[in-house]
Amino acid sequence: MKVLFVSFPHHTHYFSMVPLASALRTAGHEVRVATHPDVTDQITAAGLTAVPVGTGPWYLDDPWAPDLFGQLLEEGSGLVQGFDFTGEDRSQWTHESLLALESLAVPALYASVSNDAMLDDLVDYARHWGPDLVVWEQHTFAGSVVARAVGAAHARLLHGMDITVRARQEFLRLNAELPPGTAQDPTAEWLGRVLERYAPGLGFAEEMVTGQWTVDITPPSSRYDLGLPTTGVRYVPHNGASVVPDWLRAPAGRRRVCLTLGVSGELDTAFSFGEALAALADVDAEIVATLGGASRDELGAVPDNVRLVDFVPLNDLLPTCAAVVHHGGIGTRSTAELHGVPQILLPYGWDTVAKARRVEELGYGLCLPAHELTADGLRAAVLRLLEEPSFAGAAAKVRSEILAEPTPNDLVPVLERMTAAHRRTPAPAPQTTEAAPSTATTVPLA
């Protein structure tokens, strides 16, 4: 079959798709990866075939008012980022607040990624190539649009806590309590308008938000139970083009702690990256700190127990570590879980707070919100992870969960069966009959 992957225009999101795309390809299926041109080099470096769509950079694809769009993206996405997706602050989970969240998320995130230029190119390509299955990253609704328009089956690939669908389900529940004819649904209205351009009369369906089914790479114990047809798959790290450094080929002389803040190397904390390193100077461990976007010149004196690196493949580094401190990124959290490494998350918004809370609840790490973080607090947390064996024990349980999940290779027959069940003849007419939605919460392997 032909499988089209549709990715968010950032390589860290695309990396989570690579193992499944590669498994399908080595099983004999044709695979293409479509996203904005920014990610083309990362796609081809993984040995997959890229389909650049849109003009790129993606955040400048609005031809009408790019300056205004940039302001909306910056301010609107900041408000969405700060929403309490954990549900701890129930005052934010009112109908008014959830409607505001959807109203901001559509223009500031969803429609900015799946913009007109990107969608036009994507639909044109799909009509030419004829995919049987579309696998789309959880925030890239262009994937569900194109699948619905051309009759392909489609699955949503989930790489973190399902915060937006969880919030949307509560929003829809509250919407249903309103007087008839008064409810608004910005996401459905936007997707309905977009689909009308490519398949007139077909209309919006909730599967455009949730996928016909979900492929989830997170550990089972960390997932929300949202009643959606879901199949788990083992997380397999992909670090992009990587080289194992010489120093990592030898056994570590003492305990090792990884400190990484992702590709930016920055977080909104009360102290600098250099001060964080200084706070860990007397910890009896080697601190391997990845610079990301930080500058060596701005760090000042580096403690003797710190090894500064620009980049190191986490799949090679983390198995040698007793703990990891990070910002909650997709690959860092998942790779630490795979290798059973206790972790300290410094959440800053989006889904990172929900991730950090769940890690803390399950006992294999600690949550230290970035805006509350102090140097002394960071040091104390690192010492706890190194000295209290319960964290390593809980991390080992999560690792066992992950290893019990089907591998990407194991999942290929499941995707074949699900595609056969959900694929339909591309006919954008109102009378098109769709496959009945599954009521199961787990898709069986056999």
Image (tube, grey):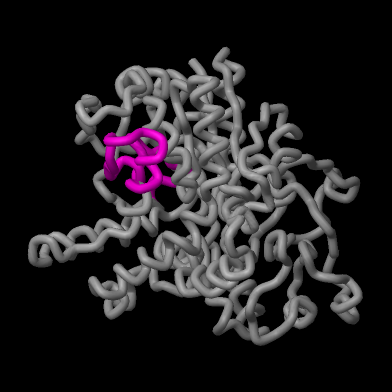
Whether residue 428 is in magenta: the answer is no
Residues 240 and 57: in front is: 57
Q: In which quarter of the image is residue 175?
A: bottom left
Q: Residue at x 55, y 84 (%)?
A: 372
For the C terminus, which image quadrant?
top left
Q: Residue at x 50, y 33 (%)?
A: 123
The reply, left or right, for residue 224 in relation to residue 352 is left
The stretch of residues the image draws in magenta is 192-221
Residue extending farthest to the front is: 64
The reply, left or right, for residue 71 in relation to residue 390 is right
Residues 263 and 257: in front is: 263
The reply, left or right, for residue 308 in relation to residue 135 is right
- Residue 203 image offset from top left, x and y in percent: 28, 40
- Vertical placement of residue 343 versus 319, above or below: below
Q: Residue at x 56, y 50 (%)?
A: 334
Q: Residue at x 76, y 67 (%)?
A: 285
- Vertical placement of residue 75 versus 246, above or below: below
Q: Quadrant of residue 178?
A: bottom left
Residues 321 and 436: in front is: 436
- Residue 442 image offset from top left, x and y in percent: 30, 35
Visible residue check, residue 387? no
- Residue 354 image offset from top left, x and y in percent: 43, 64
- Vertical placement of residue 51 versus 226, above or below: above
Visible residue check, residue 106? yes
Residue extending farthest to the top is: 28
Q: Quadrant of residue 377?
A: bottom right
